[in-house]
Amino acid sequence: MNESIDWELLGRIFANEATEDERRAFNEWLKANPESQPLVDALRQHWQASPPTESSLATSVAFNQVWGRIEAEEETGTAVRRIGQRSWLGWVAAASVVLVGLVIGWNVYQSRSVEPTLVQQANPKGTRSKIHLADGSTVWLNADSRLNYPKTFTGALREVSLEGEAFFQVAHNPKQPFVVRLKTGSVRVLGTSFNIRAYPGDSIVETSVVTGKVAFIPKQPARKRADLRAEQTIQPVSDTLFLTPNLKAVQSLTSRQVMTQSTVAANQIAWTESKLVFRNTPLGEVAKTLERWYGTPVSLEHESLRQCPLTGTFQNQSLKEVMNLIAMTKRFDYELTESRLTIKGPGCE
């Protein structure tokens, strides 16, 4: 590869942290150096297969990881033996050296952008909180959720990490993008408001936009599906989903699909105003929400209840008041003790 390549830039491109201008400049360089395209493609593949971590940033480890994968390909006969006029082993040596440089550059980039002093806000079930960040942004953190954030934002990015649900109102700063790290991807904005629901154990991750524009970058691969409604679109894993108000990204953790859907943003953030909003919500999901909201374990008497849809809006009401209203539908009954709520009924066909 051209010796003038910016390793730090290439690391940010592979990690989906480069700006559009940086990506454009790199693509222009690549057009001017087409002989480097196979090398860049192979490096991207190896990066995605084993992205650098704190324990693998040493150059010797990076070299051995690449070389080990190449030797395995040689043994199974899957490696391409020749690229142009350059022998395979000679190309591998060059690729390994390039990856070493790439890892060094990525290490430098990470060291510049990571703030070592972190704060964790962990809300138990039944507790919600409001957090003011150093940059002027505000975060509403829902029950059974955790947010890690720095006391001050330094470096190229404003980074936080989330498990659970939170509504973000991000202070605008185009020179320092705001990134929310999730286990299954990341959300990147310059200044906007959006809601993320990413509870461990749930089957989907949702990102809903209230104002502005949000970039959702999934980690998991997506597969095509034929039974999508007109307002839904599947997004390939390598692409970034750009979401605008009243759109949400839905990432399925079981089918590994990522799609966009229309939504009512006000319903998505109703919980910040102490409202519970259910719109044809399966009772299994309702039970999880009630348990997180009130801190009382909730169970279903029969598995057949799990897919029964429920529609309703509740605000500033006790768990008993909510269940009394639900029971008025004549479809469900309940038993509430000091330690548990059990939802009863014949179930749904």
Image (spheres, rainbow, N blue to C red):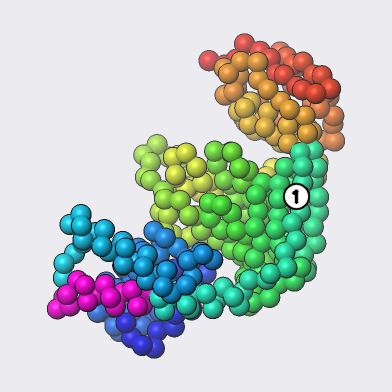
Q: Do we see residue 323 in this rendering?
A: no
- Vertical arrangement, residue 261 with respect to residue 6, above or below: above
Q: Residue furthest bottom?
A: 4
Q: Quadrant of the N terminus?
A: bottom left
Instruction: Please tell me how crowded label 1 is: few (under 14), some (14-19), or many (20+) other residues with Cα within 10 Å.
Output: some
Q: Residue furthest top?
A: 346
Residue 21 as seen in the image, left or right of residue 315: left
* Image point (68%, 71%), residue name: 115
- Vertical arrangement, residue 251 with respect to residue 85, above or below: above
Read off the residue under disc 1. 122
* Image point (29%, 83%), residue name: 33
Res 41 quadrant in image? bottom left
Residue 234 lies in the magenta-colored region: no
The region drawn magenta spans 83-99
Q: Position of residue 136 (x, y in %)?
A: 78, 68
Most frequent secondary structure within the magenta stretch = helix
Residue placed most toward the observer, 246 or 119: 119
* Label 1 element class: strand
Q: Do we see residue 273 in this rendering?
A: yes
